Every structure is written in C-alpha cells, then in structure tokens.
Image: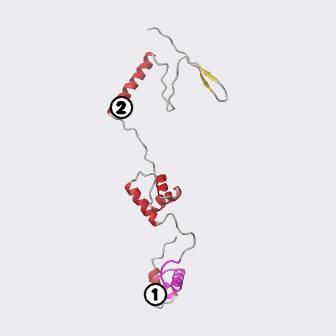
Amino acid sequence: MVAPSPYRTAIIDCVKNGMTNSEIVKKLKVSRVLVFRTAQRYRRLGTSDDMQRSGRPVAVTTPEAVKAVREKIRRTPERSMRKMSKEYKMSRESMRTIVKDKLKMIPYRMQKGAFLSQKNKTFRMKKARKLLAGTKDGSHLTTLFTDEKIFTVEANKEAKIIGSSLLTIRVPVKKEKF
C-alpha cells in the first residue's frame, strides 16, 4: 500500500477555493497527475480519505491480535511462537507474520549453556588427570579424544557391524602380572 501524498490536504483546499488543476500545479510545484487524481477522488467521494481497496480483508492478523501478542511477549518474552499460535487459535505462519512483520521482532530460541560450579570444575580436573595417568602407565589401552558420540571398547570381545558387509573387530589386551 502506497502512503498518501503529503500534498493531499493542500490540493483539496485549493480545489475547494475554486482553483484549476494547472493553477494548483504551478502553485504547489507537484506533478499534474497527482493533482488530477487527488481532485478527481475528492469530487467523487467528497472526502480526503483513501478509496476502498479491493482484495480479501484481514481476518486473523487484526490490530487487536497484534496488540494482544505484543502484550503477551512483553509479559513473557521467552514464550514459544508455536504455543502462542495454539493459544490464539491461529496458524504458525500468521503468528510469524505478526511477530516478524507487524511487531518487527526477531524470534529465536535461547541456547542452554553449561555454567560450571567450582565443584564441577574440580571434579572434571580430577577425571582428566586420572585419564592421563591411566594412559601413562598403560592401564588404559587408548584414550580417544573426539567430538563423536561416546562409546566403549571392551577387551577380547567381538563387535559385529551389520551393513553392506560384516566386519569383526578384535581388540588385543596385554596381560601383565602385578
């Protein structure tokens, strides 16, 4: 929707005073088309308001719904958009339109972070030192540092991986006497 011209009221005042379109163009220094359309709209409707627009009227994202959603977000900003859409009985896309386009907000999910207490820090340090000591004296076969899922390797066990082929993995263990 195009914003109304700031010259609209001035053009209508000139039309009321009986000025011609070309006199209004020279006086206000605006385009001829703007003056003609504004004067024609005023003569037809008798008001400076916009003409009624065609198209389907807004049913869900009404100003009342926008106001209610704004108030809900103000009270509880961590509220989920999906939950709000269920609460207001509208689709997720309509809720997204209200939040992003009408309220100019950016929805996001808060990430949870691990805030370590001093107790957890000392426990992790002890565990890491124990792992390193185990690798030095050979009590652990290998220490694997990875970002993959944690798994265990058991000694003298056969693991079968089923897929396109069967594989057998054997893990040798040194037997030492103490």
What residue is shown at x 51% (from left), y 13% (from top)?
Answer: 174
The residue beneath circle 1 is 14
Is 61 positioned to the left or the right of 74 in the image? Answer: right
Quadrant that contains the C terminus? top left
What residue is shown at x 42% (from left), y 63% (from top)?
Answer: 67
**Position in image of residue 70 (x %, y %):** 41, 60
Range of magenta residues: 22-51
The furthest residue to the right = 164
From the viewer's side, name the closer residue of 69 and 13. Answer: 69
Q: Is residue 118 above or below residue 42?
A: above
The residue beneath circle 2 is 120
Classified by dominant secondary structure, the portion drawn in magenta counts as helix
| Amino acid found under the numbered disc labelled 1 | Cys
The furthest residue to the top = 177
**Position in image of residue 148 (x %, y %):** 51, 32
| Amino acid found under the numbered disc labelled 2 | Asn
**Position in image of residue 8 (x %, y %):** 47, 80
Q: Secondary structure at mark 2?
A: helix
The furthest residue to the left = 118
